[in-house]
Image: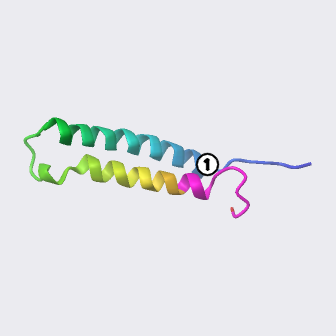
Amino acid sequence: MHSSHISIWFFIGVMLTIYGGMILAYGIYELVAGITDQVVLAYLHAPIWWGGGLAVLGLFYLVKFRPGNAEQ
């Protein structure tokens, strides 16, 4: 009998990718639309960096812990 399981890290990767994509999309929208908040360091565009970082980390987890991957 073969028992298959899906790692919790795969689902964490799914969540990080979705949240990162949403934050990245908002950051790009904010940049293109010219929305400027009155905060210090607004020129660094934090949503783009954080969203991109979350999406990359989520994609890493998706690939590393995908179901059927024998390396786990």
Answer whether residue 16 is magenta in the image: no
Q: In terms of secondary structure, where does tag 1 sit?
A: helix
Residue at 9 percent across and 50 percent down: it is: 40
Judged from this view, the residue extending furthest toward the bottom is 71
Judged from this view, the residue extending furthest toward the front is 32
Could you tell whether 6 is left or right of 9 in the image? Answer: right
Q: Position of residue 9 (x, y in %)?
A: 58, 52
Could you tell whether 61 is left or right of 29 in the image? Answer: right
Occupied quadrant, residue 69:
bottom right
Occupied quadrant, residue 32:
top left
Residue at 37 percent across and 55 percent down: it is: 53
Q: Position of residue 58 (x, y in %)?
A: 48, 51
Judged from this view, the residue extending furthest toward the right is 1
Could you tell whether 59 is left or right of 38 in the image? Answer: right
Label tally: 1
Residue at 74 percent across and 48 percent down: it is: 5
Q: Which residue is mark 1?
A: 8
Magenta: main secondary structure: loop
State whether residue 53 is above or below residue 24: below
The three-letter amino acid code for the residue at tag 1 is Ile
State whether residue 11 is above or below residue 49: above
The magenta span reads 61-71
Answer whether residue 65 is magenta in the image: yes
Q: Position of residue 37 (x, y in %)?
A: 11, 40
**Disc 1 packing (10 Å; few <14; some 14–19; many ≥20):** few
